[in-house]
Image (spheres, coloured by chain):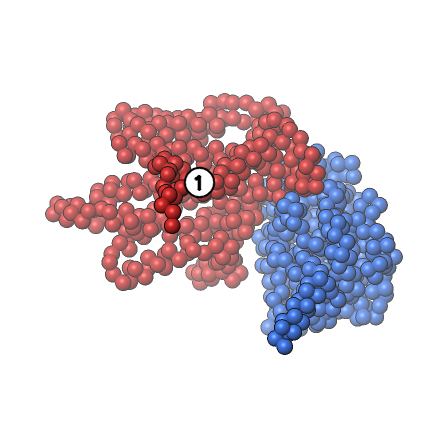
Chain colours: A red, B blue
Amino acid sequence: MSKAKSPLRRLNETQSAYLLLLPFLLTYGLFLIYPFFRGVWISLHDWNLLQVAFNPDAKQFVGFENYVRVMWGRNIEWSPWARPVLQTLGLLGIAAAVTLNRTRRLTGATAIALGLAGVALFLIAGVYAGEEGRWFDRRFWPTVGNTVLFVGLTVPGVTISALLIAAALNRETRAMGLLRTLFFLSQVLSVTVVTLIWQIMFSPRQGLIANITELSGGSPITWLTDERFAMAAIVIATIWWSLGIAMILFLAGLQDISKDLFEAGALDNCTGIRAFWYITLPNLKRTITLVIILQIILHFQVFGQSHLMTQGGPNDETQVLVRYIYQTAFRDSELGRASAMAVFLFVIMGAFSIVQFLVGREEKD
Amino acid sequence: MKHLLTGTLLACACASAATAQDITLGRFFGACEDAGNDTKASVGEACIIQSIINAADAEIEGVSIETLPTDWGNYYDQIKAAYAGGTPPDVHVMHRHRVPEFAGFGALAALTEDDLSGAGIDPADWTDSARDAVTYNGEIYGVPMDLHANLWHVNMDLMAEAGLVENGEPVLPSSPEELLEHARQLKEATGQNYLAADFAQFPIGVRLVLALMWQQGENIFSEDGTATIDNDAAQVAVETITQLFAEDLSNPQLNYADSQQSFLNGEAAVLVNGTWVVDFYTAEAAKEETGLDNYYAADFPTLFGEGATWADSHIWVIPSPVKQDAEKYSAALKVLAFINEHNVDWARTGHMAVRNSVLESDEYAALPHRTEYAGTADIARDTPPAENYGAIQDVLNRELQAIWLTDKPVDDALADANIEVQDLLDR
């Protein structure tokens, strides 16, 4: 046996840290960083999926034309009153951020986030196609709107129902353990199974919901093809599906709250709903923020539910961004255009990640 | 002894590895678990095609076929992604309407007459429309398998109750006004809907409107790439259908499965759907428990000047990269030849055969309901060839659904459809 030091021992701490990080960095670089920049690169080209596969020279550099073709139009104008309701809502958001911050009911970063959201809403909602004008891609912005609506309905739905279930199940009995498992079970199903289950549930001919409405004397709703209910249908299926993770996070948060607080509260006659409102909720604030931001990022990427349950219909009411990207890339073979939309989606999700980062940092201080 | 045995085993393994050509096959039509090898016994598109493939796998010397798992709804997306990744299946099925898109980029192998006859396929036996279906810029790019079209599937008991049967044949309308009249008459006599179709999911409603436009001598776009949807013919075609919805003589909210179920339950006298379900409905009508007992498959009626119904063809193709491997190419051709050979078995689905020798055979004439829709081959139509056919169909489906599911005004929907289709044709 030689007594020479093994080469590994000669490394200092930093060097071995890099060595241990290497597998991660390689995988991360290869499967996330490289594809991302490649995607940006493709988005700057007129790039037909099939054509380039058979002739690599068939792509053409077009700069930002894909972005213009997707997001802009002819005679696009801006006015502070183009969409009064949305823009007023944006102004109210700015006002609320300022006043709440002044009265110290909102902290710096949260106020800035709310204020920026208000400014963005006020500015974006004011853009419209003027007379004789048109959007080059008439479906893109409505699709973005549908995606935002989906997120806007799903995230509060998941958060509130998961919170209530977690609060109800936060007891150490066997029955509660069983129920916790049951509620979590839906989470392990794949999107195909979930959508299949809910398509049967929503079916106006054989579905459970239709049978119940018929028993109570109503005529069954054609959930998936009625414009008033199609979005609600995919939101309901999604809430049922993604309840589990949020519930587990809330349960963990709940178990972190010291029992002393509840005992002290009970002495002051603060029990039940009041205890939930004044003790549980304030102590869960961090978990709630985390759940909301994770859900926002997750649900912006909705695809399967819309693709499998409604095919984006009726009349594009449930068309969402990822499905539009998918169709553009694979049905229409327009990879450049699809990549431009994907970069747009990345920017939105990146913005929410930054918000999460800011909020998380602030609470550590 | 032991060595000898091992040696023989090894030799066998090597020999079979050297001669057996593995062919991967991509298809839609849905899954069939136990199709078996008997091409004469299976029922329904999925099982009939799989039984033919299984038989090919068993009977063609030195070729073993692996059917890839694919999904109907996303078939072309999957196939395109496979081409883009450089791993397309060795043979795959597609529609006639996709040929310009795939052959246009050189994705498909051009099959010479020598290749075809060498494998035992005689292109001269194909009908003219079948030969057109696989021809692009003068070259043959595939082997046709059928001509399929929209039919009117009829519940004869409901029609008889409404007095709409003469000489054992259904009396079908010859004008939009008569259509409305028949529908009212049937509702009055039976309380059921006159017409059902998938107006809410797949583009079957689109194909109905297209047929009614072609019957007036119009089309949705011209060969030179100009959208022509925003006109009186389209307006009339759409209103021919919406007049039924307005009086509750048809329900636009049923999707494919629900509309089919309502027909099988005896809740609709007519179902507009393709030739692919004739054998399935025949089998269902024979069952005691279904509401449909007396089934008739009729040609799409002519409501305007000329006869027309939407039609397409399923064809089998070989990707161009396969041609670089001569043995694989020849094995792939053998598979296509086997499918071509079993054209009459495939026709059992209800599709029309593509080989003249099959069309003239007694076996073909003896297939159920065949004579009832003998006129369909003559009125078969489709839109002009276009590379983004799929996207155009989706635009029409969306705008038409907006009319009947969300009450969008017809004028607005047709104007929007015209702009969007023009955008697609201009891209």
Q: Is residue A186 visible?
A: yes
| Residue A351 locus on image (x, y percent) | 43, 32
Which residue is painted at 41% across and 35% down in the image?
Answer: A352
Which residue is painted at 45% across and 56% down in the image?
Answer: A189
Direction right: furthest residue? B124
Q: In the figure, B419 relative to B150: above or below?
A: above
Which residue is painted at 57% across and 40% down in the image?
Answer: A325
Direction front: furthest residue? A2
| Residue A15 locus on image (x, y percent) | 39, 36
Q: Residues within 10 Å of mark 1 (few under 14, many from 20)?
A: few
Direction bottom: furthest residue? B1
Looking at the image, residue B47 sits to the left or right of residue A361; the answer is right
Mark 1, chain letter? A
Residue pointed to by mark 1: A22
Q: Is residue B215 visible?
A: no
- Is A42 in front, or is A110? A42
- Is B82 in front, or is B327? B327
| Residue A173 locus on image (x, y percent) | 25, 61
| Residue B152 locus on image (x, y percent) | 71, 59
- Is B229 in front, or is B279? B279
